Amino acid sequence: MMGMNTDIMNGSFGGSMMLFGWLIYILVGVALVMAIIALGKYIGRQ
C-alpha cells in the first residue's frame, strides 16, 4: 500500500491525489463529529 502511494505521488497528478485524500479525511472527520453531536442531542432529548 505504501509503495503504491509513493508511485502515485511520483506521477503527474500526485499533488491533486494527495489533496483529494486530505479532503476525504476532512469529510469523514466532519461526518463523525456531526454524528456524535446528533447522537448526543438524541440521547439528551430522551
Image (cartoon, rainbow, N blue to C red):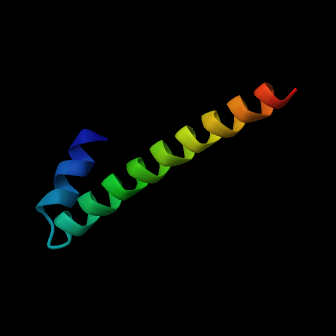
Q: Where does the C terminus fall, quadrant-wise?
A: top right
Residue situated furthest bottom in the rendering = 12
Q: Is residue 40 above or below residue 9?
A: above
The percent coordinates of residue 22 (x first, y second) are: 32, 53
Q: Residue furthest right?
A: 46
Residue 18 drawn above or below residue 28:
below
Placement of 45 over or under 2, stated as above or below = above
Name the residue located 83 percent from the left edge and 31 percent from the top edge.
45
Q: Residue 33: x percent and y percent?
A: 53, 39
Q: Position of residue 10 (x, y in %)?
A: 11, 60
24 shown above or below 45? below
Residue depicted at x 40% and y 50%: 26
Image side of residue 4 versus residue 11, left or right: right
- Residue at position x 40%, y 48% in the image: 25
Nearer-the-camera pick, 45 or 36: 45
Quadrant of the drawing holding the N terminus: top left
In the rendered image, the residue lying farthest to the front is 45
Q: Residue at x 46, y 43 (%)?
A: 29
Q: Nearer the viewer, residue 30 or 19?
A: 30
Q: Is residue 37 left or right of residue 17?
A: right
Asked which quadrant contains residue 37, the reply is: top right
